[in-house]
Image (cartoon, helix red, strand yellow):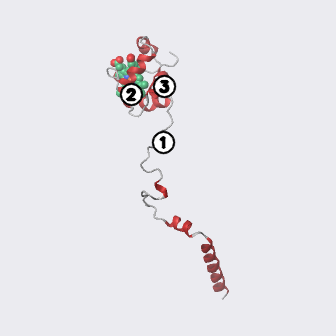
Amino acid sequence: MKTVITAITSLISLSAFAASEDADVVLERLKHPAFVCVMGDPCSENLGKAPVAAAARTGDQVYLSACAACHTSGAAGAPKTGDAGAWGARMDQGLETLVKHAIDGYKAMPARGLCADCSDQEIADAVAYMIDGL
Ligand code: HEC
């Protein structure tokens, strides 16, 4: 008997607890995990808007993701990063020309090192990183 009473008491307190929750909160929590956001819903605020521009990457980040594959190994005749001998004559052209060649492409060097979403500034920073200290 005592068990039955305990069970009933806990049932009552459970339903009292549930009733105290805001129905909207409960509905929100019960939403199907594959809920689709449609225009007009409050969740659609950012639908169709351009994503917020990502913060610019630093020279070494761009270098590691876009340039290192060729410029660390010297693949296809790429001047190796930090190799004064490989960069000497190229450096004589001036930084501006080096950056221009990195952006536009130059002989076997593909435009932007194939980094389509790299900004001019990010490419310039990557070039500066490659020849830093030379
Ligand atoms: C697919 C290989 C490859 C990738 C990736 C690559 N490069 Fe190059 N890069 C080369 C080659 C090869 C050369 C040498 C071109 C030549 O003089 O024949 C070169 C040359 C350069 C030069 C010297 C240009 C000059 O005027 O002498 C710069 C600066 C440069 N790369 C910057 C970069 C930057 C910055 C990145 C990354 C955003 C990058 N490269 C990614 C292959 C690559």
Question: Looking at the image, which residue is at 36% across and 24% down?
Answer: 104
- Residue 78 lies in quadrant: top left
Say which element carries label 1. Answer: loop
101 in relation to 2, above or below: above
Q: Earlier in the sequence, mark 2 or mark 3?
A: 2
> Circle 1: is it few (<14), some (14-19), or many (20+) Cα within 10 Å?
few
| Label 2 lies in ligand 1 vicinity (Cβ under 8 Å) | yes
Question: Looking at the image, which residue is at 52% across and 64% down?
Answer: 28
Q: Amino acid at mark 3?
A: Asp
Relative image position of residue 60 (x, y in whole percent): 50, 28
> Circle 3: is it few (<14), some (14-19), or many (20+) Cα within 10 Å?
some
Q: Name the residue beneath numbered marker 1.
A: 52
Quadrant occupied by the N terminus: bottom right
Q: Earlier in the sequence, mark 1 or mark 3?
A: 1
Q: Name the residue beneath numbered marker 2.
A: 112
Write down which quadrant ligand 1 falls in: top left
Relative image position of residue 119 (x, y in whole percent): 44, 30
